[in-house]
Amino acid sequence: MPTDLTTYLGPLVLRNPVLTASGTFGFGEEYAEFEDLNRLGGVMVKGTTLHPREGNPAPRITETPAGMLNAIGLQNPGVDAVIAHKLPFLSRFSTAVIVNISGESIEDYVEIARRLETASRDSADHPSPIRVDALELNISCPNVKVGGMAFGVDPILTRELVAAVRAETRLPLITKLSPNVTDIVQMAEAAVEGGTDILSLINTLLGMSIDVARRRPVLANKTGGLSGPAIRPVAVRMVWQVAEALDTPILGMGGIMSARDALELILAGASAVAIGTANFVEPQAAVRIVEDLQKWCEAEGVASLRELVGAAHSK
């Protein structure tokens, strides 16, 4: 009998546990010609801000020995353009649509959440052309000078921000945490106290690369976020620590390149996983990982993927 890959991520019911991480999959249009988006558990769109952003100056991406360093700086067309021109396309697919939102102030986050909820709400005589299944609060971007990671390294600010957005919307809230902290459990607890439904971890690690020939930093922003296989052990450790401390559902991410990588995070306590840097290496990576997860589970006699969530913890 085929393994049931259905997973429950807080209030979200996903057909399988594989999503695409924000910032690595655009708004879905770019990848739709390479893979059937209906085969994914969900798509997390590019970080969306209240107003359009051009992002940081180039160069803003460079390769490292086991991953990628980026300082894009949340380039995006702004929430109104995302509602009008990006989400209608993505809403045609029967996969979860999760909008990653970011801001320079708590008021920015609240206003973006309000606009997305209003736009996605059906009325009696006018069904909405867009679907928003959840919001991911990006409080951990290391590549912007205002807002971003500043919210995600202070538990008081984290609690205040999540509570303010929680008061504005009934949409499920996912809070994306930064690994650039001393105590990840403390930050997770603050987000839960604020009212988040789900925890997303981890975002990128702050890093830097220097061009030896030019004797200058490679990135124009000087520092950037490190992603890819190099950070997976950090992600596994943080998912494990948060799962040990809290019962809140976890969306795990960080350097997943294969089904076995995804299983590490699931066994550590993640109910679902998001694929990031692998999308740049192989546009079909997320679908391949779904297929390989199915094969692995069936070979191992696993009836339901849900029985693997957190299975590495001693009970």
Image (cartoon, grey):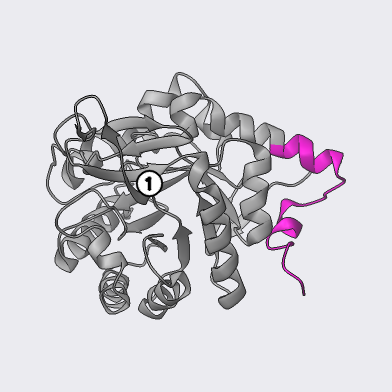
Can I make out residue 95 in this image? no
* Residue 69: % across, % down: 34, 38
Q: Nearer the viewer, residue 265 or 210?
A: 210
Q: Is residue 303 magenta?
A: yes
Asked where in the image residue 262 lies, by quadrant, the reply is top right
Q: Nearer the viewer, residue 142 or 89?
A: 142
* Residue 274: % across, % down: 51, 45
Quadrant where the N terminus sits is top right
Can I make out residue 155 in this image? yes
Q: The residue tagged with tag 1: helix, strand or loop?
A: loop
Q: Is residue 54 above or below residue 306?
A: above
Q: Is residue 298 above or below residue 35?
A: below
Residue located at (28% from left, 79% from top)? 156
Residue located at (29% from left, 47% from top)? 126
Asked where in the image residue 220 lies, by quadrant, the reply is top left
* Residue 43: % across, % down: 45, 41
Residue located at (18% from left, 68% from top)? 106
- Magenta highlight range: 293-315
The residue that label 1 is drawn on is 131
Residue located at (20% from left, 46% from top)? 79
Quadrant where the C terminus sits is bottom right
